[in-house]
């Protein structure tokens, strides 16, 4: 289950941004979706830092992402995968500028 997702309110095209997704500890993959574009991350992906909190039963995924196009109010959705993909549960909005 995706507990929360947070991304930047604003970003610059091509510059690194951070997206944080908190999931339950049974998740093996996180997927970000925006208007037909999907990016999937594993715990071992190069641009992902993982912090597991066994006591809370959560995993915090810190993803380094570069937004590629200018937009005004893009909505991104986070999904996760344990045994199957979850429904689109949480979202954040970002304005991307030059």
Image (tube, rainbow, N blue to C red):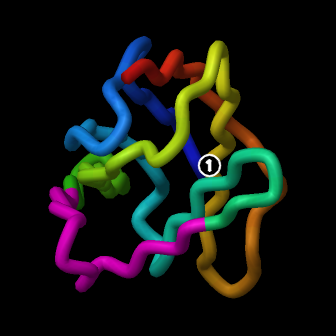
| Tag 1 residue | 78
- x, y (%) of residue 28? 46, 80
Magenta: main secondary structure: strand
Q: Quadrant of the C terminus?
A: top left
Q: Is residue 1 visible?
A: no
Q: Is residue 41 above or below residue 49?
A: below
- x, y (%) of residue 37? 70, 60
Q: Give the side of residue 48 with respect to residue 25, left or right.
A: left
Q: Residues within 10 Å of mark 1 (few under 14, many from 20)?
A: many
Could you say which quadrant of the image residue 86 lies in?
bottom right
Q: Is residue 50 magenta?
A: yes
Taking depth in this image into account, of 54 and 93 the one nearest to the observer is: 93
Q: Which residues are magenta?
A: 39-52
Taking depth in this image into account, of 35 and 20 the one nearest to the observer is: 35
Q: Is residue 94 above or below residue 15?
A: above
Q: Is residue 96 visible?
A: yes
Q: Give the side of residue 10 with respect to residue 77, left or right.
A: left
- x, y (%) of residue 59? 32, 57
Q: Residue at x 27, y 80 (%)?
A: 45
Q: Secondary structure at mark 1?
A: strand
Q: Is residue 32 above or below residue 35?
A: below
Q: Give the side of residue 61 with respect to residue 53, left or right.
A: right
Q: Residue at x 46, y 47 (%)?
A: 68
Q: Residue at x 53, y 73 (%)?
A: 40
């Amino acid at each position: 289950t995706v507990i929360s997702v947070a991304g930047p309110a604003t970003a610059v095209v091509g510059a690194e941004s951070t997206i944080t997704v908190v999931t339950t500890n049974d998740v093996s993959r996180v997927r970000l979706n925006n208007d037909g574009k999907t990016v999937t991350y594993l715990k071992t992906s190069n641009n992902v830092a993982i912090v597991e909190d066994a006591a809370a039963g959560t995993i915090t995924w810190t993803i380094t992402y570069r937004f590629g196009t200018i937009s005004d109010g893009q909505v991104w959705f986070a999904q996760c995968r344990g045994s199957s993909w979850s429904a689109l549960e949480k979202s954040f909005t970002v304005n991307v500028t030059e």
